[in-house]
Image (tube, coloured by chain):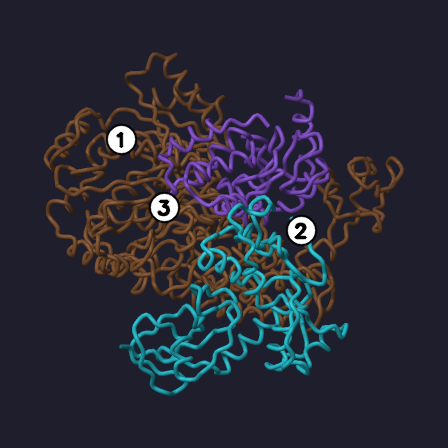
Chain colours: A purple, B cyan, C brown
Amino acid sequence: MNNDPERVAAIANKYGCSRDSLVSILQDVQSEYRYLPEDALRAVAHALDLPLIQVYAVATFFKAFSLKPRGEHIVTVCLGTACHVRGAPAVLDEVKRQLGIGPGETSQDKRFTLETVNCLGACALGPIVVTDDQYNGQISPGKVKKILKEYKKLPKE
Amino acid sequence: MVELTIDGIKARTWEGTTVLEAAKEMGITIPTLCYHPGLTPYGACRVCLVEVVKGDRSSLEASCTLPVEEGQVILTNSEKVRKARKLVVELLLSSCPNSKTLQDMASNMGINKIRFKIKDRGCILCGLCVRYCKEQMKSGGIGFVDRGTSRTVATAFGVTPEECRNCGGCEWICPVCERACLAGNLLDGLCGGCQNVMPVETCPVCTGCSESVGPQGHKVY
Amino acid sequence: MTRLRSAIALEQLRSRIVGQRDPEKACISICGGTGCHAYKCEDVASAFKEEIERQGLTDQVELKVTGCHGFCERGPLMVLYPQKIFYQRINPGDVPEIVAETVVKGHIVERLLYVDPISDKKAQFEEDVTFYKEQQRLVFGNNGLIAPTDIEDYLAIGGYSALSKVLFEMQPEEVIEEIKKSGLRGRGGGGFPTGRKWEACHNAPSYDGIRHIICNADEGDPGAYMDRSLLEGNPHSVIEGMIIGAYAIGSRSGYVYVRHEYPLAVKNLIVALDQARAHGILGDNILGSGFGFDIRISRGGGSFICGEETGLIASVEGKIGEPRPRPPYPAIRGLWGKPTNLNNVETWANVPLIISRGADWYSQIGTDGSKGTKIFSLVGKINNTGLVEVPMGITLRKIVYDIGGGIPGGKRFKAVQTGGPSGGCIPESQLDLPVDFDRLIEAGSIMGSGGMIVMDEGTCMVDVARYFIKFLTEESCGKCVPCREGLDRMLDVLTDITEGRGKEEDIGLLEDLGSVIKEASLCALGGTAPNPVLSTIRYFRDEYEAHIGEKRCPAGVCKALITFTIDEEKCTGCRVCARECPQGAISGEKKQLHKIDQDECIKCGLCRDSCKFDAITVS
């Protein structure tokens, strides 16, 4: 694991190593490594002078964080109430079937991670499937295959 | 000094006392699970609920965390309290069926059926072990991890923490890790017949204490 | 930029800014809210920029990308000032025509006008659009006039004049009295009287004088995005409110806690805070008054319970978002053990308005118990999806029909869900209910943060109840037994009912569980979680009974209880559905009636979506 404790310390310093920025620091660390490696969490605990179990508890409590490496492409299905009422569960089922994984899981080939979110605030376009940063609106189960096909065609990173 | 009324009896106690402690001073014992006089109160198990009456409205509050207030009117065993307490214990049993403490508590309340699916978590998440480790032993190597029904008491990354001094306190203070009725059927275990028998320690949840003992055999780090 | 050191300096800057702006100059205000970003509004904005340059109009026409205008259904949209011509559903291809015809010649491009779905009338100007007409956009309306990353836009419309008045003409206690007099109640869901909250924090003993102010921008209710749009579109209104509150309460330290899912709000807020500091409006010696206050941003990590005040405070302290029992309330002992005042984004945004125009004026709006306006997110099965700001006391019927334009597809209204997972469903019989904190509670719901989900005949109320309980079981912190285990068992029962395993005693069990969870839980998540279940049992008991007794889902939603069949009359034998079916459950020869094998069918709905002849029915 090419893990540089100095990179983590630099991130912590950006926030003044302040405890009120623990979540922000972890988010930046996760952006760096695409997940939260064990060594990085130990480094954060050290930098902020916090018990390791506290940092670990925060990393497992908040769903923004992943302690396992995530895929190259993140597919997010919105399950907000407005999207639910417009048929989001059926869309999620189809995405699960197409990718072969459940919410929170990453595909074997590490290409896709499937996530769900509780409201993106674009309710007029519901149901919505976000692929990386792209919003795909008014999705029905029939449209899922087409969207994912484009991503499956992309070369591996 | 603060004056309040508990179960119709006037009580006077110091400001900063909790309703649970004030009741105890008067000889009223409110059942608890996650409370221990030597540790900060947590308010998680909801067994110590009391009814706080305000005019024609009332609410249920955990007495272990409720500070006394001047003029408070408290009921420790009203119908509302009993109904809530009973359901809480029923829920606890359905999530930790193999606990003699819970079985005895249930039989005392007259619970003779569990209407919910049994999902044995082996732990009631009362946090006594966590608080003991942090406050009494000043170690704090174990804590609550994840959330909701996935919440467990664990160590960081599942390894014995450096702070652990093998005191065994987490196991000792646990209210539910003892041998339960082996009659074979959970409902038989609610008969209350062996209430006065001392339980034998068997820790169902290993927090990584390398000195853990028990007839069931544990992973030793 | 030199820091402003007096009220006069602020006014001089304002006059200079206003003086440099020509109110008659053409200005295109394009909605740049997150909702419109999903419609690629940035492509429309670029197209305008290019076209304006191409036609050599850069000096005559101003282009402003603003925050959310509220009419999310019709994005991308724009308003052309000074006439206030309103165009909706614009794509980049429309842009050259808009510039050539409307901006230059003043001619209307008819196809881009809004047509009311019920009356069929076209509206040329923003104020005639029925969606906006019935609203009273006192707080949200400014979004259309402001580029969120430009403090000068905020100053141009009078921003920070309320702050100036407070710092130089009012004592802290007078400010608190004014807020109390206005009748402002918290907009985050609890509806607690704001003035009293401020007073409690102001009066709470603090040996070192430290008090904290927090803005709760966690906005966790699914389907609610008002706070996000306010924070993205007009961050200064919130900042101004917070500085005024800090002065009134005696705090020098403030936090805005923004949920993880709102990156644009964080971005715009950072810019706004930096600009405010550069102008001497934030930091030491604000406007030369001697009062100092600054704001830090604290971010959420994806946890609904961190919208609960003690969970939020724990999260800011670097701990897990686990609520703690109250008393002591945060006003007495909150963040880092100090007296802390926590208010919602919309509550803070109302403060400058109340100070500028006075509590007397403010308390004229609304009902006896609920003063002012409220912003709602009107979403779900509704024609005009969007954010609406209405005076308290307006009826739900007006919101759904006059503003919302009714239900799409000619379907029948069934219920409107308010208050998110803490609220309840209000049926058609109660549509004339006025929007008011106390009236909504009487009806079995709550105002909540403002999510308003409209449901029609195709929505299964048991499924909705299950949806909310499932959401809450995933968001429960897990500390207390009634919420952690109780909601989990409620979910078991509801799942059984929706999957055809419901038993007669289940409704009673849900009511028992619900009433105890409400009373015995440690915090308001558990304390309000049973509401959607209890309110749907109250108003839609027949649906529960159909699921349990007849194993039937009247709305045709619950997979285990519905059947997909092919309509003999409509099927053309085109084979499309058979090819789409992932289970190969559809058989049939070309040009012959097709048939679905019910044993293989997994109810995924792909066949229904692919059939061009509407031949697949659900029963």
**SS category of the residue bearing label 1:** helix
For disc 3, the chain is C
Task: Please say if A148 is above or below C513.
Answer: above
Q: Are marks 1 and 3 in contact (CB under 8 Å)?
A: no
The three-letter amino acid code for the residue at tag 3 is Lys
Q: Are marks 1 and 2 in contact (CB under 8 Å)?
A: no
Q: Residues within 10 Å of mark 2 (few under 14, many from 20)?
A: few
Q: Nearer the viewer, mark 1 or mark 3?
A: 1
**SS category of the residue bearing label 2:** loop
Circle 3 is placed at which residue position? C133
Rendered-image quadrant of the C terminus of chain C: bottom right
Rendered-image quadrant of the N terminus of chain C: top left
Residue C366: mark: none
Distance (Cα) linking label 1 and label 3: 34 Å
Report the front residue among C13 and A1: A1
Residue at horizontal 48%, vertical 83%?
Answer: B78
The three-letter amino acid code for the residue at tag 2 is Val
C600 relative to B159 in the view: left or right = right
Circle 1 is placed at which residue position? C275
Circle 2 is placed at which residue position? B220
Q: Position of residue C617 (x, y in %)?
A: 74, 49
Residue at horizontal 38%, vertical 36%?
Answer: A17
For disc 2, the chain is B
